[in-house]
Image (cartoon, rainbow, N blue to C red):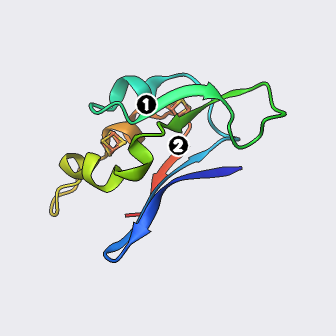
Amino acid sequence: MIANYGYKDGSGEYYISVDTDKCTACGDCVEACPYGVFEVMDDPVDPLSDEQVAVVTEAERKKIKYTCGPCKPVTDRPPLPCMAACAENAISHSW
Ligand code: SF4
Ligand code: SF4
């Protein structure tokens, strides 16, 4: 299942998606993100599952465009730290 965290406003759509089928709850994205965007917890999308997954913290879901800004230069965009850290390729960004 794809879990989307974020919002849209007049300037665009700002969502981080985690593929919960791919996520192994390894926590590497938690370590890699310099701004504490991720945490590993019980799957909020599927309460019946006893699996843990990476999620975007509640506080960051409302301001993710600004938190991720320093990781997203306009030109010469490098791999984002969170995506580069995820060996399962479970993380994507909408912008
Ligand atoms: S690095 Fe990838 S597999 Fe590991 S917890 Fe984060 S999203 Fe899940
Ligand atoms: S883009 Fe940067 S700030 Fe945003 S979640 Fe990934 S590592 Fe964290």
**Which dot, 2 or 1, sits closer to the camera?**
1
Judge whether 77 appears above or below 19 on screen. Answer: below
- The quadrant where residue 22 appears: top right
- The Cα–Cα distance between marks 2 and 1, rounded to whole angstroms, is 11 Å
What residue occupies the far right of the structure in this picture? Answer: 48
* Residue 29, label in figure: 1
> At 28% from the left edge and 48% from the top edge, which residue is drawn?
68
Where disc 2 sits, the SS reads: loop
Q: In this view of the protein, which residue sits in the foreground, 9 or 16?
A: 9
- Residue 34 appears at what percent x and percent y? 27, 31
Q: Is residue 5 left or right of residue 74?
A: right
Quadrant the C terminus occupies: bottom left
* Residue 89, label in figure: 2
Classify mark 1 as within 8 Å of ligand 1 or not, answering yes or no.
Answer: yes
Label pair 2/1, CB-CB below 8 angstroms: no
- Mark 2 is on which residue type? Asn
